[in-house]
Amino acid sequence: MLQRPTRQTVTTSTGLFKVDPPRPSIQRRDLPPGPSELPLVGQAFRLRFDLIGLLQEAATYGDVSTVSVNPTLIYLVNHPELNREILVTNHQKTGRSATAFETVRWMMGDGLVASTGAFHLKQRRMIQPRFHRRYIEHYAGAMTEISSRKARQWQDAAKVDMEQEMRELTLQIVAKALFDIETSDVVRRVGDSFAETDRYMYLRLTQPVFLRRLFHRLPVPSTRRFMAARAYLDELIYGLVRERRQSGAEGDDLLCMLLQVRYEDAEGEDDGGMSDELVRDEAVSLYIAGHDTTATTLAYAFYLLSQNPEVERRFHAELDDVLGDRDATLDDLPNLPLTDQIVTETLRLYPPFWALGRMAFEPIELGGHHVPPGVAVMVAPLITHRDPRWYNAPLEFRPERWTDEFRSELPRFAYFPFGGGPHQCIGEGFAWMEAKLALATLCRRWRADALGKAEIVPRITIKVKGGMPMRLERRR
């Protein structure tokens, strides 16, 4: 048990966040090189409408480059050792920006996805043990059962939006694991609510601060939709929390786990559990992280397989050899090496957490460049994962590259699809198991042909532009 964290454990004027330092005044000649900017507006338009293209261009200037001077000063880091410097070595000197994460906290409150500092560390230490392998393996059966149900619902030659199909699938899995609910109408409405809040958070995040705060207070359509979606989720989650508390929080779902954890006071005495508000925040954080990342990974895996028939042929042969006419189980995963390689390579090309931003709160040195307080620093798995220094043919889908020898020689932070350091995704093990079991269970019976090109859309996590239309084909 741990001492109960309180908002007073981090003494700042913005609750759990340090106040962002003022932006430093630095001459352009003293900054790392980077893309040229427009007069007055700087990179405002590209930050809003072409952020991935801007990052790709900035990376060509070196391992440390200036993405933007105006309206925000941003450095991009693109080297495994420098990624480690930001996420691990200097994590106490850098942190989540109070201004940037203000938008995320409108939805996620003080949950692990949005919190920082001592509060985040105590919450993570308390929750982390429940994501140990021996706990999450309990959910493997539900992952397979729900994936098998989805496979039975599909129709031969049907046209589907694979991203939407995978989102429905992972929503059902996480709803079962987190809340022990399976009602399809409830799950669907939960999914719609999370999709609405995701769109809203990214919309506001890409706006200047004064506009972001202004529109969040005005009853404009986007704000009304966000408020309605959040209100529905709050009503549902608080209702489930009341039910669990009245029943003694007996159950195997993750919500019961959140209600069962206890804190200790300074003398080691039981200091109670989390408040309903904090349980709600952690549940929302786990729900979003648990379904969103895996849904996109599975959708892109189907797409990449459709574009690489030889890999798909070998994948189906592996499934036929190991599974035959039954669904995948947890015990099968060690015997499905190509399945693991396919998921690994999909996460390389399409990492869900495609860019991770930090604020420098103290001076640091990065690659020979002085970084003063007030500079936003970004590491981008999407950029590093496609760097030819670490990967041959980096834009090609080559699952076979992931041999034991290649993995052992690859620098640690040349591949980090779930982040790293104290803020590494707590549900990473859950997501890996979910992706591999679902992909094996679905592809044992089905393959799919892409009906268009899949394009990346940068949101809070990576998405597919306009969905992913595919035609299903039953495997004979």
Image: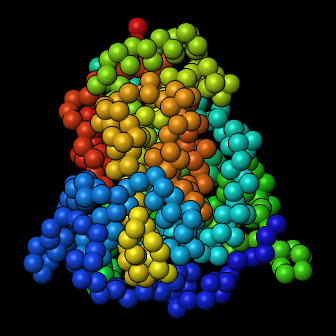
Identity of the residue drawn at 89% across and 75% down: 268
Q: Residue furthest left?
A: 39
Residue 316 seen in the figure: yes
Q: Nearer the viewer, residue 178 or 23?
A: 23
Q: Quadrant of the N terminus?
A: bottom right
Coordinates of residue 318 in the picture (x, y in percent): 51, 14
In the image, residue 3 above or below residue 210: above
Q: Nearer the viewer, residue 191 or 52?
A: 52
Q: Is residue 118 left or right of residue 91?
A: right
In the image, residue 42 above or below residue 337: below
Coordinates of residue 312 in the picture (x, y in percent): 38, 19
Residue 159 seen in the figure: no
Coordinates of residue 458 in the picture (x, y in percent): 30, 55
Indicate the quadrant where residue 295 lies: top left
Q: Residue furthest front?
A: 368
Indicate the quadrant where residue 374 lies: bottom left
Colour convention: rainbow
Q: Nearer the viewer, residue 136 or 375?
A: 375
Q: Nearer the viewer, residue 444 or 25?
A: 25
Identity of the residue drawn at 38% across and 27% down: 398
In the image, residue 309 above or below residue 455: above
Q: Is residue 90 left or right of residue 138?
A: left
Identity of the residue drawn at 14% across and 77% down: 41
- What count of labels does the image hold? 0
Q: Is residue 325 left or right of residue 164?
A: right
Identity of the residue drawn at 53% across and 47% down: 412
Q: Quadrant of the C terminus?
A: top left
Coordinates of residue 88 in the picture (x, y in percent): 56, 62
